Amino acid sequence: MTIYNMLKADIKILNRELKSEDEIIEILKKRLTKKEFKYYMMKMEGVEKELMQKELKSDDERFDEIEQTTIKKLNAEKLKHELTTKV
């Protein structure tokens, strides 16, 4: 799955076109924590949940927190604005 498809699936309202893949990855590196960024990249690669938990060194509860905060941050207007190009 590409970063574009992942973001379009996770961001609820996206009114503009996304920037290039390299720019998006740089923005996500800057705006997400290391574990959130690592989680999102592994999710994009299709890694299984158990393997993600082992890699992130987290239990079920902490993994769910990482997942929820990542999605919440992606839906923040400030980050959405950074990820998109001006029309």
Image: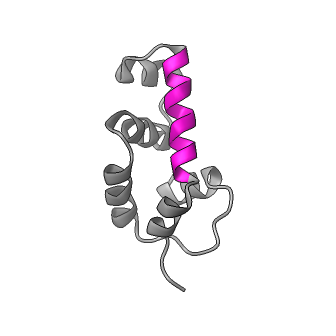
The quarter holding residue 56 reads: top left
Give the magenta part as a residue range: 61-74
Residue 24 in the image, given as x and y percentages of width and height: 40, 61
Residue at position x 68%, y 62% in the image: 13
Instruction: Give the residue at x 39% y 45%.
Output: 32
Residue extending farthest right: 12
Instruction: Name the spot of residue 87 as percent of width and height, x first.
Output: 54, 86
Residue 68, position as x, y percentages in the image: 57, 35
Residue in the picture at 53% in, 27% down: 65
Q: Main secondary structure of the magenta part?
A: helix
Q: Nearer the viewer, residue 49 or 79?
A: 79
The quarter of the displayed image where residue 60 is located: top right
The count of marks equals 0
Q: Is residue 83 left or right of residue 6?
A: left
Magenta-span inclusion, residue 33: no
**Image coordinates for residue 77, horizontal then vertical, percent:** 56, 62
